[in-house]
Image: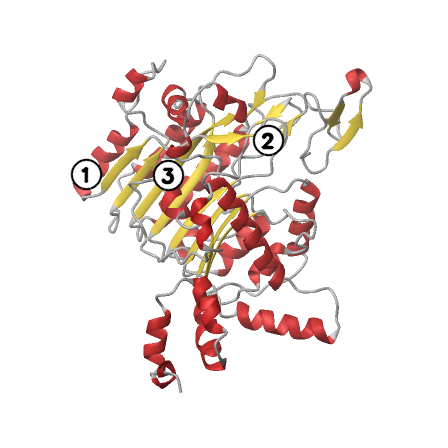
Amino acid sequence: MSPLDSLANELRMHICSFPRPHDLCALMRVNRTFHSLIEPMLYSNMELHRPGYHEHCRYPDTISSGERRNYHENDAGDYLEDTLYQGLRYTAQAFDLLKAFENPDSDNLQSFVRTSRSQAIANQVRFLCLGTDLYHDEQKLVDPWGTIASFRNLEHLELTVGWPYDYKDWDSAAQAFASMDHPPLDKLRTVRLRGYLPKEFVRYVCQGATGITDLELALLDRPIGSSIAYKRQNPPPGWKHIESEVDGNAWLDGENEDTASDKDSDDEDYGHECVAPRALPNLLDSGIDLAAHFSSLTRLTLCRPAESLNPVSDIQSVYVSLKSDLAILSEWAAVIRAIRGTLEHLVLDQRPFAEEIERDATGDTEFLVRYPYGPGYERFVEHCLPALLEEIEWPNLKSIRLYGFDVPPEMAETHSSPVKPQKLGLQVEAWFKPLGVDVRSGLGRRMMYEEVSGVVSPHGDGLGGWVEEHEE
């Protein structure tokens, strides 16, 4: 008998808590005893990012929630690869994981056994964090959101999702999820959703869990992109494509003839040459009583794209959806008002958006210093800031972090900012200092998007933002 076999299960579990996941995979194959002991440990915490991803991408002065990041490493050689290539490898690994849990189409015995086995393992998962392109492979996931919903005992769900190459994959996946009923993920305590997730799935997650204590919403609406030289890669729903013989171009018109641009209209107009990234509001019209539903919330992080002062290109005009921006700011204000009785930590992240070509003209820091106080900033001050500064008690609030709102005066002088830095962070700090709240305001990051497709860059932190070491 092996000395390890003579140990009590508690001691063996303690010993097995130290090796990394890929080492546990090898240990699990030793015998049945180790297999039964290690399998629940191996699958309970699924963190499929490159090692150090979260530590690398988070803002340095953000207060950590303290959860352990148990990265599932491919192999030791990953440390020698650049971060972009590592990210692609782990994206593929996350896709393969979901593919393994996706319900097969066949009804034969082998598929039934596989489905039963997959569901038994899925029920062991408590912590699931994926940074993934759900459509990167020719195999494609038919129902990726339903597959994630099959992890019924999740307590921590964290997703950073990119846009597919073909918008039809996105639409079919959203329709597949909406066509089925899914048991609620009522054990969730931490929900962090970033990037391109369908509204149906976001509402399913938020409505099904009343015990959420940590909520992050950094959601992007479907991209539209440019129509200058190509047909739109990502046409809005309900629009039809019209081929034009003029210059060989292809154009997209609405099914009605009224495509005139009017930023002050209540309706969004996608007939413009280029459409900027838009936030995806989810909660106000979902039927959720925010105050009652999020009665346990202690940590809230909200992120949105914002219109900056960056001058518009002479080649094309960029349409910014006023309707979308006002909707997300109204949602921010409503959520803040609803949960301030329990809230301990608040993070607001405003990201000035810019086309990828802007990298050839400015670095991240230079752009954020020169162009932050645009219409997006002004709309925040008008529509959301009052929710913070109302004379209402915040009995448990400990910290506020503001990113993308302020420019330090010394940085404005260095980069020749065309506007005088404003001091929103100091205003918030003055309001909350008597309450003992730690308020800090950081420069933040910009949100880069691709001109033709309108898609926010999936690299960096998954929201179009690159961390400092990527700057030239």
Counting residues from the N terminus, which is met first, the one under dot 1 or under dot 3? Answer: 3
Which callout, 1 or 3, points to the residue nearer the camera?
Answer: 3
Q: Residue at x 44, y 65 (%)?
A: 23
Q: CA distance from mark 3 to mark 2?
A: 24 Å
Counting residues from the N terminus, which is met first, the one under dot 3 or under dot 2? Answer: 3
Q: Residue at x 54, y 48 (%)?
A: 89
Q: Quadrant of the C terminus?
A: top left
Q: Quadrant of residue 117?
A: bottom right
The kind of residue on which mark 3 rests is Leu
Q: Residue at x 66, y 60 (%)?
A: 180
**Vertical placement of 198 versus 225: above or below?**
below
Q: Residue at x 51, y 42 (%)?
A: 85
The kind of residue on which mark 1 rests is Lys
Is disc 2 in contact with disc 1, using a CB cutoff of under 8 Å? no
Helix, strand or loop for disc 1? helix
Q: Residues within 10 Å of mark 3 (few under 14, many from 20)?
A: some
Residue 307 drawn at (x, y percent) = 47, 26
Q: CA distance from mark 1 to mark 3?
A: 18 Å
Circle 1 sits on which residue? 433
Q: Which mark is residue 319?
A: none
Circle 2 sits on which residue? 454
Q: Is residue 387 left or right of residue 134?
A: left
Q: Is residue 469 left or right of residue 116?
A: left
Is disc 3 in contact with disc 2, using a CB cutoff of under 8 Å? no
